[in-house]
Amino acid sequence: MTVPAMRRPRIKPEHRAYRTVDGHVRIGSVVHGIGAEVRDPDGWVWTLVEAMDGTRAATEVVAEVARRHPGLRLPEPDIAQAMADLTGAGYVEDAGADPPAELSERERERYGRGMTLMRWMDLTPRPSAWEPQLLLRRARVLLVGVGGTGGAAARDLVASGVGRLHCVEPDVVELSNLNRQTLFREHDLGRPKIDAVLASLRALNPDTTVTGERREVRGPADLADLLTGRPAAGARYDALLLAADRPPAIRRWANRVCLASGTAWAEAGYRGPLVSVGVFTPGRGACWECLRDTEIERRDLRLAPGQDEDVASPRMPWNPANAVTAGLSGGLLAHAALMLLCGVPRIEPGCRFGLNLMLPGDPVEQRAERRPDCPACGARQADGTPMDPA
């Protein structure tokens, strides 16, 4: 990892350190996955984090720590290394960094609260705390399906400042949609969903480029065409977000098409009270089929020979849902997009995570190793060529 040089190193405000009763230094907040504890028997680590307040250059920080602990005879390289370790762990920002010129003052005001949240979750050293927001602004995203999950994901991404979002949806607005698809209003009944979505999203954030088309995905060729032919100036999409649940094979198609094109993707939805999102990056971790096949093997449904697994969890012509489950799944999908596009927070792809609303303390979490026998990524790995998306 390359640690950026910092003019005036400062512990991030969200990661402000404190001393424990036994003299250790806790830094990074009390959030699991961020915070850490450092042993500090001689007290100089605490002096170091205090000196890193954004008012001193790095050399001045080192000199200040050495000055305040003369009896320890601390080698300056050791102090500098401790500062580099804290920076490499993601707890430090550069108070002297100029905001990126690509982001206007208006954008910095608009996205300021989001920047501080990403700074809190971001454990990657960066030249500027605004870098994740800049990555999001440059991103191009393809979203298939803008119903309950997709509409919430689109709303959250546009509000967060995604650069370009292209939405694909074939349906019209129906009365039964309105209990969960919150981009629509009663006056939209009978109107193509894509028209209502574009109007709503453009009104939400005129700085984001939102486009769309009324189109049904009927096979992997449709997804491949969408991925390769839509962004402005011939640029490819940075991520595919799948929020459609039909045809039933659409996730398999997306997996194969994204493997063939090298496109990161995520899919989300709800199954009754279970709300989850899957996150996948070709070449890193399990693909969707690896994860699905491993999960099928892991579950013990105690089915009789020949019984279909749907008897254990029946599927209906409609998907039971409300605005809560749709909003949660859409929020998770947008969160997955931010992870893929901005690297905040860092995640190893090839996993599924979410919530069980029946038991709030019981998270949904699935992870698998990449399978050499996987018919999608395993065969691709073996001979170096992509699988046929079909």
Image (cartoon, grey):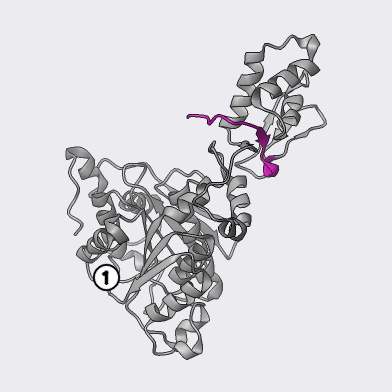
Q: Residue 89 location in percent, x, y?
A: 58, 33
Residue 383 among those drawn in magenta? no
At 59% across and 25% down in the image, what residue appears? 84
Q: Is residue 11 left or right of residue 206?
A: right
* Magenta range: 2-15
Image height of 5 relative to 305, above or below: above
Residue 245 on image: x %, y %: 36, 69
Identify the amino acid type marked 1. Val
The structure residue drawn at horizontal position 39% and vertical position 47%, both measured from the top left corner, is: 350
In the image, residue 318 lies at what x, y percent?
40, 79
Is residue 361 or residue 128 the one in the foreground?
Answer: 128
Q: Nearer the viewer, residue 32 or 189?
A: 189
SS under mark 1? loop
269 lies left or right of 220? right
Residue under pointer 1:
217
- Image quadrant holding the C terminus, namely bottom left
Q: Mark 1 packing: few (<14 Cα in 10 Å), some, or many (20+)?
A: some
Residue at 48% across, 90% down? 187
Q: Say above or below: 387 vs 21.
A: below
Where on the picture, by quarter, is residue 363?
bottom right
Of residue 151 and residue 109, the one placed in the foreground of this image is 109
The picture places residue 189, in percent across and down from the top left corner, at 43, 89
Left or right for 129, reference 135: right
